[in-house]
Image (tube, grey):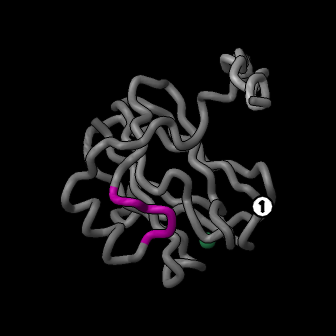
């Protein structure tokens, strides 16, 4: 008859998750926003055939923004673009921002739409405004064979 009360006190809890720090840093305008947009067949083929690092079969939905950023030198070894595939609205200025990882990189369109210098310093940038809808695939020349490929899908 000594059982009563042994478990008292374990039930309450009451920690109803007030921990969610909503604040954030206001950094929501950069990379990897949301994701999940579908990828046009020709873009999927390009990225898949080249084993694009960081490409998971979907594209980051970055539409409705005047400017977006894509990281150059992302991933464990610095041989990726992040996001590898991005969907933007026509008229969007895309700025590629170098992380400083992975050595020298450049951003070269597969159809001569744009081409950056080779750069390696963290914070280096290259910008291109996509005025017309279409599919734009690109790669990094030094790491083309290592899967450093990306795409911008302009709606
Ligand atoms: Cu590279």
Res 61 quadrant in image: top left
Query: Which residue lies under the disc numbered 1?
Result: 100
Say if disc 1 is inside 8 Å of ligand 1. no
- The location of residue 71, given as percent across then percent down, is 62, 52
Res 104 quadrant in image: bottom right
Residue at 51%, 51% in the rendered image: 83
Asked whether the viewer can see residue 20, the reply is no
Looking at the image, residue 39 sits to the left or right of residue 6; the answer is: left
In the rendered image, the residue lying farthest to the front is: 1
Q: Which of 75 and 73 is in front in this view?
A: 75
Looking at the image, residue 101 sits to the left or right of residue 139; the answer is: right
Q: Which of 124 and 16 is in front in this view?
A: 16
- Specify few, some or many for label 1: CA neighbours under 10 Å numbering under 14, 14-19, or 20 or more: some
Residue at 60%, 36% in the rendered image: 30
| Residue bounds of the magenta highlight | 52-57
Q: What element carries label 1?
A: loop
Q: In which quarter of the image is ligand 1?
A: bottom right
- The location of residue 63, given as percent across then percent down, is 39, 30
Residue at 72%, 20% in the rendered image: 13
Magenta stretch, overall SS: loop
- The location of residue 64, given as percent across then percent down, is 40, 23
- The location of residue 115, given as percent across then percent down, is 51, 60
Residue at 19%, 59% in the rendered image: 41
Q: Nearer the viewer, residue 22 or 150?
A: 22
């Amino acid at each position: 008859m000594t059982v009563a009360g042994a478990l008292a006190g374990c039930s309450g809890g009451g920690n109803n998750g007030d921990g969610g720090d909503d604040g954030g840093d206001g950094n929501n305008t950069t990379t990897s926003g949301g994701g999940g947009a579908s990828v046009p067949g020709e873009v999927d083929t390009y990225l898949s055939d080249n084993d694009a690092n960081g490409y998971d079969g979907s594209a980051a939905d970055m539409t409705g923004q005047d400017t977006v950023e894509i990281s150059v030198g992302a991933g464990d070894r610095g041989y990726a673009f992040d996001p590898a595939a991005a969907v933007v609205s026509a008229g969007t200025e895309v700025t590629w921002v170098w992380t400083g990882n992975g050595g020298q990189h450049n951003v070269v369109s597969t159809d001569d739409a744009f081409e950056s210098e080779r750069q390696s310093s963290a914070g280096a940038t290259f910008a291109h405004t996509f005025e017309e809808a279409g599919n734009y695939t690109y790669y990094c020349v030094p790491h083309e064979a290592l899967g450093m490929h990306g795409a911008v899908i302009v709606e």
